[in-house]
Image (cartoon, grey):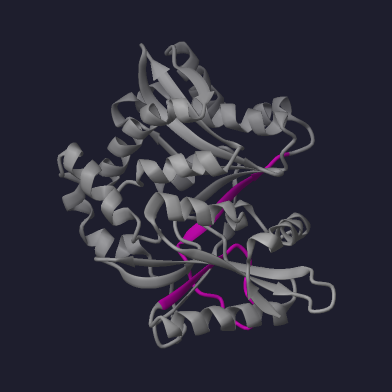
Amino acid sequence: MIETLQPQSRLAYEEFLSGDSGANYCHDPAWLDVFREGYGKAGFILCWKDPRSGKVLGAAPACLLSGILFGRNLVCLPYLDYGGIVAGDPLVQNELRAELLSRALARKTGLELRCSQPLAGLPSVPNIKVAMTLPLSVDGADAYWKSLDAKVRNQVRKAEKSAVSISWGREENLDEFYRVFCVNMRDLGSPVHSKFFLAAVLRHFPGAQIGVARRAGRCIGGLFRILWRDTLAIPWASTLKEERVHCPNNALYWESIRFAYERKCLQVDFGRSSKEEGTYRFKKQWLAEESPLHWYQFDSRGQAQSAVRHAASGKLGMMKTLWTRLPLPLANFVGPLLRGGISA
């Protein structure tokens, strides 16, 4: 039996997330509040319930996106790497997928499923993006530190020698982080997330924190992390290009990994990267392990696509060079207006 999650069923849904090994922080129902407050986007969570016990045995959160450049799509889930269908039973997976497709067809939109595990009955679809995750060993932070390459350890020490200081907070660090984040995203050629979106994440995730790296009293880098059960996720991080010689990013990541060990986490989720690109190699040096991302896309007629199409290789990719040349104030004004309609 499939139903849309209602407030009175939230406890049953939370219990399901606690007991399902495929669930992750992207399945937290708080994201629907974040999407609504940050971008005015409506979302819902489909729950498959056992008709006898009433227990939730599968779920699929989704959000409808619409924008000038990228049209309308039902995405499960946008802005995040995962958050797709989660269910151990293949029959439950198939029923949830059929219901999502039915809702997408009724809205005359495409459907995108972003899963961390393959779905039953669907062929594997090539994807240049991979998930990067660091399993934390029982030996502790000291043993992990010694296992790192000497170059990585030296980069962390270089940040210390360059008098880079790290401080952690929440809303009080948002403005400094966001200024660096805006510069970095413009330089990458990508519209920046709205500050309202990031503020909503802080409001709805008690385990969210922002670390800022300062040098000579100036913020030169920042990292946004979310502690969710036994995982520390790092969805966003940025540093100023001219300050990277002082290795603020290395200091921020090392502080986060050490924090994860202190909190007895089982893993650090570094998010997605394109294979062999700069962020991929940066995460690899921390001994992160890659795993395939199982993303499935269907057009507005319900036809499955044979390859994953990424926003960065489509219209967004074509405007990348132009975006890097925009004056920062203009990019900061226009970027959030477009970003809500981009699923990436």
Q: In the current view of this chain or complex, which residue is farthest to the right?
A: 53
x, y percent for residue 285: 54, 38
Q: In this view, does 197 lie to the left or right of 170?
A: left
Image side of residue 339 versus residue 149, left or right? left
Residue 161 at x, y percent in the picture: 46, 12
Q: In this view, does 198 lie to the left or right of 96?
A: left
Which residue in the rendered view is the most extreme toward the front?
A: 8
Q: Magenta stretch?
A: 110-136
Q: In this view, does 254 lie above or below 161?
A: below
Q: Is residue 191 magenta?
A: no
Quarter of the image where the N terminus is located = bottom right
Q: Position of residue 19 (x, y in %)?
A: 78, 58
Which one is nearer the viewer's eye here, 20 or 265?
20
In the image, residue 121 lies in the stretch drawn in magenta: yes
Residue 94 position (above or below residue 33): below
Residue 276 visible in image = no
